[in-house]
Structure formats: structure tokens, C-alpha cells
Amino acid sequence: MKKDNILFDLDGTIIDSSQGIYASINYAMRKLNKDELSNEILKTFVGPPLLESFIRIGLEQEKAELAVSYYRELYQKEGMYQVAVYEGMKETLQKLSQDKNLFLATSKPEYFAKKILDYLKFSDYFTGIYGADLAGIRSEKAAVIQYALAMEKLENLSSIVMIGDRKHDILGAKENNLESIGVLYGFGDEKELIDAGANQLVLQPIELLTRLK
């Protein structure tokens, strides 16, 4: 799969961000006087827009919006820095960035995504960093991808691939007529990615170097 422009998801693709995300979600639940969530439910929060996830577990719109604001209280203070880079990812980004254009396309607010990449010293690997807006208007993965393509004036869709770990990444790519690679080391699983229509699957980051030659 020869591609010159590569869109990367963040959570579950570049980093394991579960510690900070899970802690911030349960912080929000406690602030709402609700029971903390199980790890099984917490895992479903990684990938989709946060507001959508709080509504999915039964919170009404107003409570869900409040939960998002509580989540961000802890996340901005410490949660965003509680991350682990997947083994081989730094080397993969270093090598790919030497002759390809890398872009971040995440449903995480762009403000947080930029801070995380700066913290990891990964920002220089990326030509552009794109994410959701804090108001939640641009939060679906398809909208983030569309935004990235427009901002970078990327019109040759055959030169672009989206890499991610959840169905939202794959479906977002399809909505923008892009090919996609699903990663199996993140928060999704093989069935989810195949059912969504991933063109290829990889077991570990380093495999991307051979897949994207």
C-alpha cells in the first residue's frame, strides 16, 4: 500500500491513554454522585466522542455535558499526561516522517492532542495535528478527517490512508473515500475492524513500515 499522506489516530493507535482517560471518566461519575464504571464499559469510551459515550451509558444530555466538563477538570490537570507509547511507535513515526507526510486525526480535542504530542516530543513528526473542537461541533471522526483534508488541501485521495484502532477510524475513512489500516494492539478488536471494512490489519506498530512502502 504505497501512500504518501498518512493520517494517524491517537488514543489506542499511538498511545495507550487508558489510565488517564479511565481516571477522568470515573472522576466525572463521582462528581455526578454516580457509581464508577467497570473497565469493560470504560474501554468503550476510547474512540467515540466523549459526549456521545456519556449519553450511551444513560446520562441525559444536560448531565452528559456536565460530565464532559468534570472529565476535563482532571484530564487537563493530570490525565492527559498519563499515557504510554506503544512499543515500536516512536521508531515507526521517525522513519515514516522521513519521506512521508504524517497527520494526526483524532476525536480528542485538538487542544489536548497538541499538548500530548508536545509532551511526548512527537510533534515534529507531524505535518499537521487535527482533532475535535472543545465545543463538540467537530467531534465525529469523519468530520475530523474532512477537516484535516481541507486544511491541508489534500485532494489526491488515493495517496492517503487512515490508521486507527476502532471502527470509528475505519468508518470515518470510508466516509471520506479513503483506505484504512486497523491496528490490533489498541482498544478495538479484529472483528470490529473487519466488520467496519479495514483494508488491512497490523499486529504491531513496526509492521506499518513494510505495509506503507
Image: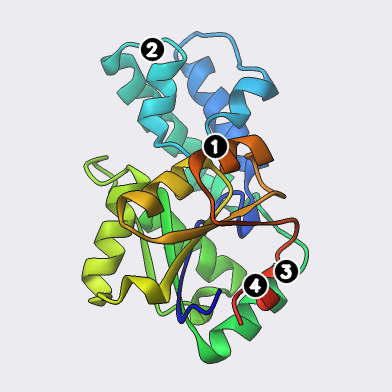
Q: Is residue 45 above or below residue 30?
A: below
Q: Assess disc 3: are there few (<14), some (14-19) or many (≥20) residues with their C-alpha within 10 Å of its C-alpha.
A: some
In the rendered image, the vertical position of residue 52 relative to residue 190, given as above or below: above
- Residue 30 drawn at (x, y percent): 53, 16
Q: Position of residue 78 (x, y in %)?
A: 57, 46
Q: Nearer the viewer, residue 211 or 121?
A: 211
Label 3 residue SS: helix
Query: What is the CA distance from the residue labelled 3 to the residue labelled 2?
Result: 40 Å
The residue under label 1 is 195
- Frontmost residue, 189 versus 119: 189
Mark toward the viewer: 3 or 2: 3
For badge 4, the amino acid type reads: Arg
Q: Amino acid at mark 1?
A: Asp
Separation (CA) of disc 3 from disc 4: 6 Å
Is 137 left, or right, of 34 in this rendering? Answer: left
- The alpha-carbon separation of the residues under discs 1 and 3 comes to 21 Å
Circle 4 sits on which residue? 211
User: How many labels were placed on the picture?
Assistant: 4
The mark nearer the N terminus, 1 or 3, is 1
Find out whether the residues at labels 3 and 4 contact each other: C-beta distance under 8 Å: yes
| Whether residue 132 can be seen here | no
Q: CA distance from mark 1 to mark 2?
A: 28 Å
Residue designated by label 2 = 59
Q: Dot 4: within a 10 Å radius of its alpha carbon, few (fewer than 14), some, or many (20 or more) residues? A: some
Badge 3 or badge 2: first in the primary sequence: 2
Residue under label 3, please give it. 207
